[in-house]
Image (spheres, rainbow, N blue to C red):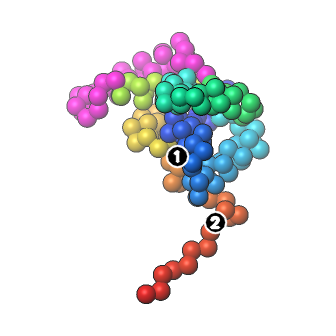
């Protein structure tokens, strides 16, 4: 299964109706470009959970948006991902990590990266620094929203202040 992974930080912004400006333009452009290239946008089930936790009455709308978007595919934390995660954690869970990050947060981030690795994903789109560290340790590129290109049609001319 080829594709890229969106974590919850991207999903939350993607479904945020108040998101606007360069951040909205770059995120919409990314989704359009991935769709045009027929690249699957994979969403690990744990990331979907994070999106839905605070969705409230918008929960059904979010789920419908994911189902109707042909580029999106939610996939489970299954035996394949669990095995990958165990192998990764065996190497990564050292005494330095144990002191720096809570055990639950550490495992949750690794579960998301293991989902990506178990599907041979080359890129994870995430604004979570811990996900970035995990991904880099296993050779998966992690991309923050600030690093996304802003489509030229959306760039606004900035007029410098003249004091």
Q: On screen, 84 above or below 27?
A: above
Magenta segment: does it hold 90? yes
Q: Which residues are magenta?
A: 75-104
Q: On screen, 153 above or below 95?
A: below
Res. 6 image quadrant = top right
* Residue occupying image coordinates x 71% and y 37%: 39
Q: On screen, 159 above or below 163?
A: above
Position of 28 compared to 18: left or right?
A: right
* Residue occupying image coordinates x 55% and y 14%: 78
* Residue occupying image coordinates x 38% and y 24%: 107
Res. 91 image quadrant = top left
What residue sits right under mark 2 in the picture? 155
Image coords of residue 148 (percent x, y): 57, 53
Magenta segment: does it hold 54? no
Q: Which mark is residue 143?
A: 1
Identify the mark nearer the N-term, 2 or 1: 1
Image coords of residue 143 (percent x, y): 52, 46
Q: Do labels 2 and 1 touch, CB within 8 Å?
A: no
Image coords of residue 68 (percent x, y): 74, 30
- Marks 2/1: CA distance? 20 Å
């Amino acid at each position: 299964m080829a594709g890229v992974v969106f974590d919850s930080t991207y999903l939350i912004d993607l479904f945020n109706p108040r998101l606007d400006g360069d951040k909205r333009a770059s995120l919409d452009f990314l989704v359009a470009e991935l769709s045009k290239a027929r690249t699957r946008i994979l969403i690990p089930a744990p990331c979907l959970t994070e999106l839905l936790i605070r969705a409230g009455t918008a929960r059904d709308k979010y789920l419908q948006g994911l189902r109707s978007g042909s580029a999106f595919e939610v996939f489970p934390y299954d035996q394949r991902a669990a095995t990958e995660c165990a192998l990764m954690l065996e190497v990564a869970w050292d005494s330095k990590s144990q002191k720096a990050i809570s055990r639950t947060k550490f495992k949750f981030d690794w579960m998301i990266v293991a989902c990506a690795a178990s599907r041979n994903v080359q890129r994870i789109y995430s604004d979570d620094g811990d996900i970035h560290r995990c991904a880099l340790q296993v050779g998966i590129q992690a991309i923050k929203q600030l690093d996304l290109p802003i489509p030229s049609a959306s760039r606004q001319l900035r007029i410098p202040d003249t004091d």
